Structures are given as C-alpha cells and as structure tokens.
C-alpha cells in the first residue's frame, strides 16, 4: 500500500510517499481502504516534533487521525464493521502511533468504525 511516511521530525520536506507492507488484520482490527483522509493540526505538531515528549514516534512513521473509506477485511469478532461497508473513522481512532496509517488501507479498531450516514 502507499503511505506518506515521515522520515524524521521536521517540516513538510521530511515526508515522502512510498510503498509499505499491508498491515495484518488482528483480532480487534478492521482493514479500511481510504477514500479521503485529512491532515490536521495534531499531525503537523507530531511531524515537527513539538509533541515528542508526550507522543514519542520512532522514525520512520506514518501519521493519520481521521479518514473515510470502505472496510476491506475484518476479524470475525468485529460485529458492526462488515466487509464492503463504508465507514468514517474519527480523530482519536488510533490505538497507537504505529498502527494507524494515512494510506490506501489502514487498520482501525472496529469500535471506532461506524456506518456512513445516508444523506
């Protein structure tokens, strides 16, 4: 999958798009193909290193806190997060810095996944 990888703390020049391995779907995970993702102020502060005392990331790392996409795989215990369902994943969905990805297919804890509203 493709990901925007932060190679070291710093400005936008430290971020590169590159291929990374697909994450494995664990017992409490779903895999989501991203259709839209945001970069918010928290991501910018993490990338710059302003928050490394309280949110320590080890380079290289991938940022991302909000997205919308389609569930492509889910563990059998995921309940409401069904394969092929559309889902937003709100800010704060990341269980840890290493497991959340602004990519083509990030992991999301199923308790944070929800069905897309129908307008």
Image (cartoon, rainbow, N blue to C red):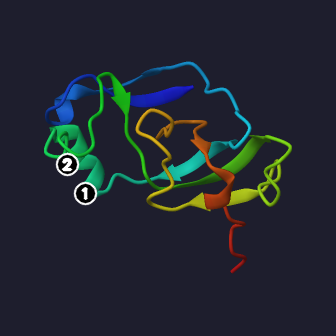
Disc 1, SS: helix
The foreground one among 32 and 18 is 32
Looking at this rendering, what residue extends furthest in the right direction? 76
- How many neighbours does mark 2 have within 10 angstroms: few (below 14), some (14-19), or many (20 or more)? some
Q: Is residue 9 above or below residue 76?
A: above
Relative image position of residue 43 (x, y in whole percent):
29, 48
Q: Is residue 80 above or below residue 48?
A: below
Q: Is residue 94 above or below residue 111?
A: above
Image mark for residue 41: 1
The answer to whether the residue labelled 1 contacts the one labelled 2, judged by CB atoms less than 8 Å apart, is yes
Q: Residue at x 81, y 50 (%)?
A: 84
Q: Residue at x 27, y 43 (%)?
A: 55
Relative image position of residue 10 (x, y in whole percent):
14, 33
Relative image position of residue 110 (x, y in whole percent):
68, 53
Disc 2, SS: helix
Q: Residue at x 21, y 27 (%)?
A: 14
Quadrant containing the N terminus is: top right
**Is residue 91 toward the left or the right of residue 54 in the image?**
right
Q: Which residue does the numbered mark 2 point to in the structure image?
A: 45
Relative image position of residue 48 (x, y in whole percent):
16, 40
């Amino acid at each position: 999958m493709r990901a925007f990888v932060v190679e070291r703390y710093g400005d936008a020049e430290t971020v590169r798009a590159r291929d990374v391995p697909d994450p494995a779907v664990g017992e409490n995970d779903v895999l989501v193909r991203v259709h839209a993702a945001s970069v918010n102020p928290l991501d910018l502060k993490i990338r710059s290193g302003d928050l490394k005392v309280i949110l320590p990331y080890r380079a290289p790392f991938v940022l991302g806190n909000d997205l919308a996409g389609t569930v492509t795989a889910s563990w059998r215990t995921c309940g409401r997060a069904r394969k092929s369902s559309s889902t937003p994943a709100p800010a704060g969905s990341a269980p840890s810095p290493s497991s959340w990805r602004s990519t083509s297919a990030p992991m999301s804890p199923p308790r944070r996944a929800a069905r897309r509203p129908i307008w």
